[in-house]
Image (spheres, rainbow, N blue to C red):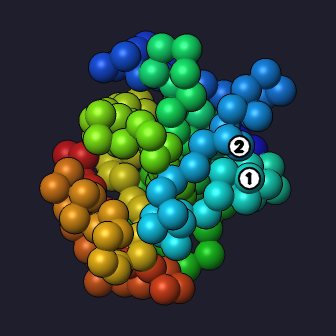
Amino acid sequence: MTDGIVYNPASEDGLRLVEVDVENYAAVLRLKVAEAQRSFVASNAVSLVQGHYHAGAWVRAVYAGEDAVGFVMLHDPRAGELADFDTQGALFIWRLMIAEDQQGKGYGRSVLEILKRVARDNGFAALGLSYVEAEGGPGPFYARLGFRKTGRMIEDEVEARLDLG
């Protein structure tokens, strides 16, 4: 996992990103999305393993106060490219999940605001991500926040980008 991303953990909207470690990994593993959303995001267990073995992965638990409410994994392209993703100056959001019982509280939107700051603080001009385009999927959420489809696919997922200029 990368240590290359600089993050100032100042709370925004009561949220902060916390390094996943021996003290909190069990809480992260307990976080689940709704059954209908499971085809849209890998489990946190899979994400933690991938993050451990991929150069450039940056994994964090999302905390509201003392409670873990979500998980985020970024890919820092300065450590090497992810297969099929053309970064073009973008910090890649590899995973973003908010637990089922925590959705609808604005946490997803707040996390993306934090990630925009993280990207800018680390010299990136954009955020990139990919998502499954299907009924009930996250595409409309990302579009409302300004992400635009690039026209490319990453395997079976739509690639999208948010320019931070």
Q: Quadrant of the N terminus?
A: top right
126 w.r.t. 116: above or below:
below
Q: In percent of the image, x 55 and y 42: which residue is there? A: 71
Of residues 58 and 131, the one drawn nearer to the viewer in this rendering? 131
- Report the amino acid beneath label 1: Ala
Q: Secondary structure at mark 2?
A: helix
Give coordinates of residue 97: x percent, y percent. Answer: 49, 49
Q: In percent of the image, x 76 and y 34: which residue is there? A: 26
Q: In percent of the image, x 42 and y 84: which residue is there? A: 153
Neighbour tally class for label 1: few under 14, some 14-19, many 20 plus, Cα within 10 Å: some
Residue 135 marker: none
Of residues 121 and 140, the one drawn nearer to the viewer in this rendering? 140
Where is residue 139, by image quadrant?
bottom left
Would you say the residues marked 2 and 1 are in contact, meaning their CB atoms lie under 8 Å apart?
A: yes
Residue underneath mark 1: 45
Residue underneath mark 2: 29
146 w.r.t. 13: above or below:
below
